[in-house]
Amino acid sequence: MAQRAKKLEEIISIHGEVDGVVSYADYFTRRPLFTSLKVRNDGDETLGDLLLTIEGTNGVLIPFQRFLEIPFESAVEITLGEILSPLYFANAEETRQETITATLTKNGKTIATKQWTVTTLPFDYWEGGQGDAELLATFVRPRLGNCAKVQSDVLAQLKKWNTTCELGGYLGNDKNTIRNIVAALYASLRKHSIKRKPCDISRPVEAGAGVKMLTDCVASPLELALFACSCLESMGLHAVLIYGDKEITCGVWLYDSCFLDTVSDDISRVETYISEGINNLSFFDIEDVYSDKNAAYSTSESHFKQKLSSGLYDKYVDVKRCRISKISPLPLRARNLKGYEVLTEEDMSPDQAPTKLMEMKNLSVEEMTKNKQWERRLLDLSLKNPLLHFNPNKLAVQLLSSSPDDVLDALTENEEMLFAPANPEAHAIAANKIYFGANAEAKRMRELIQLENRSGILRT
């Protein structure tokens, strides 16, 4: 037996790569911890009854176990699903090093093992410039209480400028009005005399101080840019973050639109959209918001253009496009008697109605009458009845849509439509095999589907 165990240790191996830095935002957006994980069998026989166990120190992972069968001279890709522990990251207060261990056993004896080290971040930390740029959009939180306070200041400033408008989005507002709203936000933030806190956005950094920014009047450029985006989104406007190795700031679409990519390094697009005569976007230099600076909004726009032309920005994040891609704002964290409690948007809203109380109901089973028995016998339950045995894969062309009305509107508005192959999101929906009726995944993608429909694209 000892010789057999030694032989298994020689032919079975575990291979994988992990995301080196993880945070609550990774759990919240369902980012996989493992970028790849394989178990390889270099032997000439198929091996079964292999138990794979994956664990993490200090409860960073939800324990994972699965029995595997590995064909000879083959490798099996392992899909883990969601294994990051929300409890661990909700209570994280400091950066830590945790060890992830994968162990393969057969009949209780270990035949292969592999370890990885990951860095875990506190609750409100972003991974930095080397991490996932999309995750910046999760720290844009339009439901912050301070956003409502700033909105009142914005309305007061607009009144001084004799600008009458509603802070509810783009409907009824032209580009000049939207730009005035952003300028009023800029002026409102300056009135709070916020002092600059240094930060290095190329490394993991705190990104959630917008909760207490107006109270402490201290913020880093990253925190201030995220809070400005939160205020813009709370007013129904589409914010855009742009950053480089040492600089970060924000802007807004001046009409109802967004980029087709959530994140891009094609800065020439921004240069085109802010140019005179096009004016689709407006950006300001976040550094001009601090108390030690004096610059009007138009001057701050010029400062941003100078930095942009100097190459200080190399990537942008479109918050609206991230929302379409189901990247939602992170919940807030509050301390309670048992530690920390994560609050969703519904938990924070005072306008949220309470859920209905459960009522006890008496269950009754109806007796099968003779008429119902005759009706049951008249039904054709054989394979000849296409209503009961309809095969959508063979007898229909499936279109990706959140509702039939949207498809009808797209066909009515466009003279020609192009059938496009399914993207990864459509494949994920098709895997659920919900061919008719409501599909929650498709409804969450409604804005993205409508955006493609307006461009004359129908996904099959």
Image (cartoon, grey):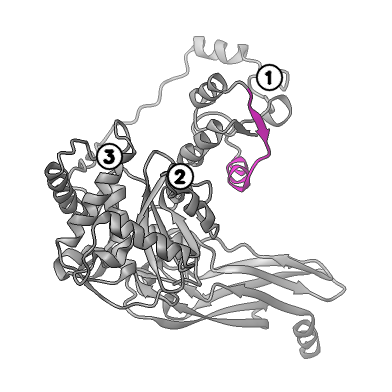
The earlier-in-sequence mark between 1 and 3 is 3
User: CA–CA distance between discs 2 and 3?
Assistant: 18 Å
Is residue 223 among what the camera can see? yes
- Residue beneath the point at 35% across and 58% down: 302
Q: Position of residue 91 (x, y in %)?
A: 32, 72
Give the labeled residue for mark 3: 177
User: Which three-letter amino acid code belongs to the residue tagged 2?
Assistant: Cys
Q: Position of residue 124 (x, y in %)?
A: 33, 69
The earlier-in-sequence mark between 2 and 1 is 2
Q: Above or below — where is 266 with respect to 361?
A: below
User: Which three-letter amino acid code belongs to the residue tagged 3?
Assistant: Thr
Label 2–label 3 contact, CB within 8 A:
no
User: CA–CA distance between discs 2 and 1?
Assistant: 44 Å
Q: Position of residue 305 (x, y in %)?
A: 41, 59
Give the labeled residue for mark 2: 258
Label 2–label 1 contact, CB within 8 A:
no
Q: Residues within 10 Å of mark 2 (few under 14, many from 20)?
A: many
Q: Is residue 237 left or right of residue 113?
A: left
State which region is magenta.
416-432
Is residue 331 among what the camera can see? no
Q: Dividing the image into 4 quarters, which one contains the C terminus?
A: top right
Front: mark 2 or 1 = 2
Q: Above or below — where is 374 with respect to 136?
A: above
Q: Dividing the image into 4 quarters, which one contains the N terminus?
A: bottom right
Residue 386's disc is 1
Q: Nearer the viewer, residue 202 or 9?
A: 202
The earlier-in-sequence mark between 2 and 3 is 3
